[in-house]
Amino acid sequence: MSTNPQFDTPAPTDELAELRNRLMETDLTALGSADYRTFHRQLKAIEIGSELRIAYLGNITLDFLPPFVAVHGAREGWLAKAHIGHFGQYFQELHSQEFADFRPEIVVLVLSLRLLRPDATAQMTTLSPEERQVLRDDVLGEVESWVKQALAATPAILLVGNFPLPATPALGVADSAETYGEMEFHLELNLGLMRRMRACSRVQILDVNRVAARIGYRQAFDTRLLHLSRMEWTEALMAGLGQEIVRHGIAAKGSARKCLALDLDNTLWGGIVGEDGALGIRIGHGDAESEAFLAFQQRIRTLKDRGILLALCSKNNPADVEEAFRLRTEMPLKPDDFSARAIGWNPKHQGLAQIAADLNIGIDAIAFIDDNPAEIALIRQKLPMVECLLLPPDPAAFVAALDNLTCFEKAVVLADDAGKARQYRQEAERMRFSAGHDSMDDYLAQLQMEVEIGPVEAGHLPRVHQMFAKTNQFNVTTRRYTLGELEAMLESPDHRLGMAALRDRFGDLGIIAAFILIENGARLHIDSLLMSCRAMGRGVETAIMNFIKQQFGTQAHLSILSAEFIPTEKNKPAAGYFADQGFRPSAHYPGLPYVLHKKDLVIKPCDWIKTKGASLWK
Amino acid sequence: MEMTEKIRLIVSDVLEVDANRIDAESHQADIAEWDSLAQLRLVTALEEEFGVKPTMREIAELTSIPAITRYLNISGTH
C-alpha cells in the first residue's frame, strides 16, 4: 500500500490484532471503568500499528477522554494517539508548532458554555429575550471563527462538540411559557450550531448532548466533579463519547463495512420457517414478538438506504424462504433488498465467503448477525475479520443492538448510496445478459455504454472522497487522500482532478472513476487513478485513458505523460494497465514510473463506449 | 483479599504506578502521579469497586491509603 501524508497505512501488529479480536467479542458499552483501564494498559504496551491521531482542544480538562477513545479505536484496529491542547487555548493551539508536528487527522473541540460565558449563564433568567439571542449569536460566532481558523490551519476533520441541555430549567415548567426561555435558548444554540457547521464539508457535530441523554444526564454529569475540577463528565459519559468519536473516525476514514449478512429464523422473523411454515413465522402486526421483528426489519431497511448491501446467510431450504417472502407481504424487507444470498446447508463461513465473492467485496467488509451463539462462535473462529453481532435473547432489544454497531458509519449519505442495492441488482441482470452473448465484444456493444469524463467540482467531492477511501482493486497507487487534501488539490494550480460517470442500457452507475493529474514542468504525472469494481471488465479504463491522452495532447507545454503503479494485496486487476495503454517503463525516475512521450501517443480503440469529455484545463 | 491490599492495587492500577511503590501507609504526597486529577479518577474507581459515593468534603480527605481504608470501613458496602 502507499504511504500517505495523512491516513497511515494499516499495519496492525499481532498484539493489536489479538487485542482487537478480544474487543470485537466484547460489548464495550457494558464495561466498567476498571475494564477500560485494563484494556488501555494492554494497549499502551503496543507500539506499532495503524495510527489515528486526534487533537483535543477546549476550555475544560480533556485529559481523561483519550484512554476511552483508545479502547474503542483498538476495536477498529487503530492505535489512537492523543494531543491535548493547553487548557483554554483552543485558538492559539491551532497555530502552534506542536499541533502542526502532531498532524492530527481529527481535531475535537469541546467547550463548556458555563466556562465560556460564566456571567451570562449564571444569570440566564435575568437576561431579556434579546440579550439571550445576542448571547446565542455571540457563542455561535466564536465557534464559527474557530472553525474558520481551524479549516485553514489543518486538513483534519473537525469535530465540534455541542452543548448539553439543562436537565431542569431555572423557571421550572414555566420556562416553556417564557419568550425565548432557557430551554429555547439551549435548543436554538445547538440547532444553530448544527446548521452552521453543516455548511462546511470537513466539520461534523460531536453530539455531546445526545450521548449524555442516551446515558441519562444523572449518570453523565457529576456536580461533585464540577465543583472540584470544573469538569463534570463522568467516566460513563467519556466511554460513550469515546465510541462516538470512533464512529466519526470510521466515517472520516471511509472504513465502514459494505455489507450486512443476516440469518433468517429468529433473526428477521420469529420461529423457524422450515417447521412453522411461511404462515406460522412471527412478523408483522398482531402480537408483541411479531411487532419487534417488524421494527427490526424496518431498521435494517434504513441501512440499505444508507448504501449498505444486505445479504442472507441462512440454513434453510431456498423454497421455504421464497415462500415466506411471497406470502408474508407485510415484511418490510423484500427479496429485491438482498444483493446476495447463501441459503442452504453449508457451514456459514462458506456462505459468507460466497457472499463476498458474489458482491466482489472483501470478507473484511462484512458484518454478520445471528441469534445462534454457536454460529457466531464459528464465524469468529473461522473469519475473525468479520464483525459479528450475537442478538440478545429478547427481540425487543434487537434494534438497540444493531444501533450499537459502529461499523456502518458514513460522514454523509450520498444520493448514490440509496441506489446501491439497485445497482448491484442491475449488475446481476447484466451478468444474465452477458451469458446470452457469444462474444465479449458483442456483449459490450449491446450494453450501450455512455461515459462522461470531466473535472471534479466541489459538489462531487464527498463521492470522490468515498472512492479514494474505499477502492482497492482497480486503484493504481491506493493513495488514501482525505477530504481536506482533495479540497486543497481543487484549489491548487498544478493539480487536475478528473472523474468519470457511467450509464448503460440497464441504468445509471453514477460516478465510477476518479484520477489526479499533477503538472511538473513539461511532465504530466498520473498520481492516482481508480475505478469502482462495478465498472470493471468493460473497457471503461481505456476510455478514461484515451481522454487523459487527448487532454495531454491539447496542452502544448506538456511533452511527457508519466504514471506509477504501487502493488498491494488487492490491486492486481490494475497491474497491467499502463503497459496495456501504451506506456513504457522508464528508468529515469525513482520508483520506475511508466512514461509516454507525446510523439508516441496512440489512442486505443474502444468503439463500444460513447465518450463525452469536458476539458480539465479551463 | 484484605481491604488495604485491595485499595493498594486499585491505587496502583489507576495511577499506573508499580504496586511495590505503594504500601499500607502511602500518602498522596509520597507519590508524584497522585495529583488532583488522578485523585478524581481514583474516587471513580473506588465508587465502582465498593459502591460508595463520597461527598466533596470526604473526597478532599481521601488522600492516603489509611484514610481511604478508614472511610471504606465506615461507609463501604463491600
Image: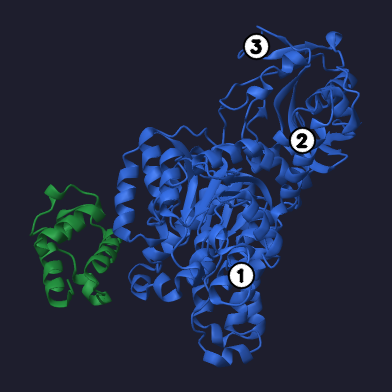
Chain colours: A blue, B green
Q: Nearer the viewer, mark 1 or mark 2?
A: 2
Write the residue at 83% across / 31% down. A436
**Label 1 crowd (10 A; few <14 / some 14-19 / many >=20):** many
C-alpha gap between disc 2 and disc 3: 42 Å
Instruction: Kindly check if marks 2 and 3 are in contact, taking CB atoms under 8 A apart as contact.
Output: no
Query: Residue at horizontal 47%, vertical 45%?
Result: A76
**Badge 2 is on which residue?**
A431
Residue A98: x %, y % from top left: 47, 41
Residue type pointed to by label 1: Asn
| Residue under label 1 | A190
Give the answer, above or below, for where A229 lies relative to A580: below
Q: Earlier in the sequence, mark 2 or mark 3?
A: 2
Mark 2 — on which chain does it sit? Answer: A
Question: What amino acid does circle 2 point to?
Answer: Met
Query: Callout 1: helix, strand or loop?
Result: helix
Residue A587 falls in image quadrant: top right
Which label's residue is closer to the chain start, 3 or 1?
A: 1
The quadrant in which the N terminus of chain A is found is top right
Give me the chain letter of mark 1.
A
Quadrant of the image occupied by residue B47: bottom left
Q: Are marks 1 and 2 on the same chain?
A: yes
Secondary structure under the numbered disc 2 in the rendered image: helix
| Amino acid residing under circle 3 | Tyr
Circles 3, 1 touching at the beta carbon (< 8 Å): no
Of the two numbered discs 1 and 2 on the same chain, state the one appearing first in sequence: 1
| Of marks 2 and 3, the one in the foreground | 2
